[in-house]
Image: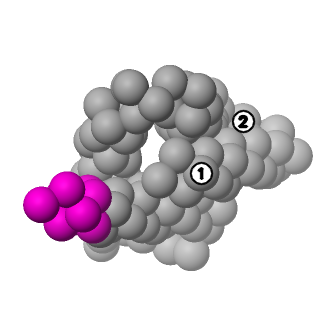
Amino acid sequence: MPTTTIACGALLILIGIIGYVHGVMSDKASITALIPAFFGIVFVILGLLANAKESLRKHLMHVAVTLALLGFLMTAGRMLSKIADLTLSAPVIAQLSMAVVCLALVLLGIQSFIKARRKRI
């Protein structure tokens, strides 16, 4: 699960950087384009810490999945609140990408937690 968290974090960093660079190139740069990258940095750190500290792995992965759920709810909620005004633009694609990556991390995390629980019993 830590490796998955690191991979999802790297994807979010990439999404944030691409979104920001696109904004700079179109003279519409905004720091909010880097929100996926900020989430991604946190996920990478949590994944690396989980790999380094076996005793904290369970707790760190729970934190990562909780943050991924918040990331999904924030982006999906924002998109749903503006559904009538959505067009296929770079910001919408970045938000949709972040929502998909965060949801994937949540689902993979839940699956991993269930597998670990069954293994313990």
Instruction: Name the image quarter holding the C terminus.
Output: bottom left
- Under mark 2, the amino acid is Ala
Residue 18 in the figure: left or right of residue 5:
right
Residue type, label 1:
Thr
Q: Which residues are magenta?
A: 113-121
Residue situated in front as seen by the camera: 30 or 34: 34
Q: Is residue 80 above or below residue 22?
A: below
Secondary structure mostly seen in magenta is helix
Is residue 103 on the magenta stretch? no
Please name the residue that numbered disc 2 is placed on: 29
Q: Is residue 86 above or below residue 75?
A: below
Q: In what element is the residue under mark 2?
A: loop
Picture coordinates of residue 84 (x, y %)?
Answer: 30, 72
Q: Which residue is mark 1?
A: 3
Residue 62, given in percent of the width and then of the height, sits at 28, 39
User: With respect to residue 68, does 87 lie above or below?
Assistant: below
